[in-house]
Image (tube, rainbow, N blue to C red):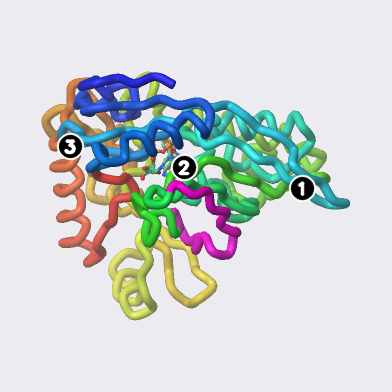
Amino acid sequence: MQIFKNCSIKKYNTFGIDVKASVLVEYDHDDEIIDFLKSNQDKILKLLVVGGGSNLLFQNDFDGLIIHPVGQRMEVIKEDENFIFIKASAGYVWDKFVEDTLNSKAYGLENLSLIPGTVGASVVQNIGAYGVEAKDFVDEVECLDLNSYEIKTIKKFDCKFAYRNSIFKNQLKDKVLVLNVIYKLFKQPKLNCEYTDIQKYFNGKTDVSAKDVREAVINIRNFKLPDPEQIGNAGSFFKNPIINQEKFDILIKKYEDLRFYNLPNGNYKLAAAWMIDKLGFKGFKHKGAAVHKNQALVIINETGEATGSDICELAEIIKEKVFQNFYVLLEPEVIYV
Ligand SMILES: Cc1cc2nc3c(=O)[nH]c(=O)nc-3n(C[C@H](O)[C@H](O)[C@H](O)COP(=O)(O)OP(=O)(O)OC[C@H]3O[C@@H](n4cnc5c(N)ncnc54)[C@H](O)[C@@H]3O)c2cc1C
C-alpha cells in the first residue's frame, strides 16, 4: 500500500485536472485498506473512491482521503452447465478484465470493450455500450461498509441498477467501498450484434466470434472517441435525456430530424449529442475547455491546462442553450467533485 500526502491528482483523472488531494492511498489487497481505514477512522472526515477517474470532474482541491484500488485479480469461483462466475478485484482495469474473461472462454462483456475505468466502478456506474450494460452480467457485489467495516454482499437485484445508475450512486453513496464484483458470464457465446454500428462493421458477415465483436467495438470506439491519454476527457459529458409523449410530440413537430430511441414504457430517449450538434457546438471553445470537433457529447481539456471551472462553465453554456431551444434539461453523466 502507498500513501501520498498533499499530492496532485492530475494523473488520477482522465480530464487531467491538476488539483490536489490531502491524502491519497493506493491499495492492492482488501486487507490493507480495511486495516488502514480502521486505524485512521477518527481522522477521516471526507472520503472519495477514485478508480480510473474517467467519470469525475474535480473543481477544487480535495480536502480529504482518496482511496485508489489497484489490485488486478480475477478468479473463477464457480461454474454450472451454462455459466461461469468470475470474481474480480475493484482496481482491475475494466478493458483488461473484458479481454481476460474472453481468454478464459467466458462471454458477454465483449460489447463493453475499451470502456475506460475499473471493475469497481463498472457497477457503480452500470456502464453500458452497444446494447449491453454491466447489470446484464453482474451476479453480486462485495463491499466494505465504511461505518462498521464489515464486508457485505449485495445481490444483483438489490443493486437497483438503472441507466448509468445504481444503489452505489444513491443510498450507498460514500457509504461503501466496492471491493470485488462477481460477474456471471456465458460459457457459450450469445452475441449481441444488433447495434447499428456493429452491424455496419460486419457488413452482413454472420460467422463472427466474441473476440471479433470485441475487435469491432474497439475499432469503432477508437474511430469515434478521443483517447484520454492524448486529450483529457471523460467520455459522454451528458446523459441522454428521457422525455414523455407530450414533450416528444412538440419536439417532433419542430424538428423532423430529431434523433431519439423509443423506450418500452412509452417514453423517448433523446440523443443529447444530436441536440448539441444541432446548436453548432462542435469545436466550440470556452477558456481551456472545448466541445470535441467530431463528438458533440464530449467535452475536452483542450489546452491541457483547463480547470474544473472552465469545463463546468462550458457545460452550463451548453445546458442553457439546449434548454432554450428544446425545453429539455440536460443532466451530466460526469460526476462533479
Ligand atoms: C473516452 C471515454 C469513453 C467512455 N465511454 C463510456 C461508455 O461507453 N459507457 C459508459 O458507461 N461509460 C463510459 N465512460 C465513462 C467511464 O469510463 C465509466 O463511468 C467508468 O465506469 C468509470 O470508471 P472509473 O474507474 O474511472 O471510475 P471513477 O471515474 O474513478 O469513479 C466513478 C464513480 O464511481 C465511484 N467508484 C469508483 N470505484 C469505486 C469503488 N471501488 N467503490 C465505490 N465507489 C467507487 C467513484 O467514487 C465515482 O463516484 C467513458 C469515459 C471516457 C473517458
Q: Position of residue 103 (x, y in %)?
A: 75, 29
Going from N to C along the chain, the mark reached first, 1 or 3, is 3
Seen from the viewer's position, the closer of residues 236 and 53 is 53
Mark positioned earlier in the residue sequence (2 or 1): 2
Q: Is residue 122 visible?
A: yes
Residue pictured at 43% horizontal, 61% vertical: 260
User: Mark 2, mark 1: which one is toward the viewer?
Assistant: 2
Whether tag 3 and tag 2 are in contact, CB under 8 A, the answer is no
Q: Residues within 10 Å of mark 2 (few under 14, many from 20)?
A: many
Q: Amino acid at mark 2?
A: Ala
Q: Secondary structure at mark 2?
A: helix
Type of amino acid at the residue the image marks with label 3 = Gln
Instruction: Report whether residue 225 is seen.
Output: no
The magenta stretch spans residue 163? yes
Picture quadrant of ligand 1: top left
* Residue 45 spot, x, y in % from top left: 23, 42
Where residue 252 sits: x, y (%)? 35, 70
User: Between residues 278 and 128, which one lies in front from this camera angle?
Assistant: 128
Which residue in the protein does label 3 denote?
59
Give the extent of the magenta segment. 149-166
Q: Which residue was labeled with disc 1?
A: 186
Query: Within 10 angstroms of label 1, few (less than 14), some, or many (20 or more) residues?
Result: many
Instruction: Give residue 121's mark.
Output: 2
Q: Is residue 277 left or right of residue 128?
A: left
* Extreme-right residue of the structure: 81
Image quarter hosting the N terminus: top left
Mark 2 C-beta to ligand 1 under 8 Å:
yes
**For residue 329, what is the image quadrant?**
bottom left
State which quadrant residue 172 falls in.
Answer: bottom left
Labels 1 & 3 near each other (Cβ < 8 A): no
Quadrant position of the C terminus in the picture = top left
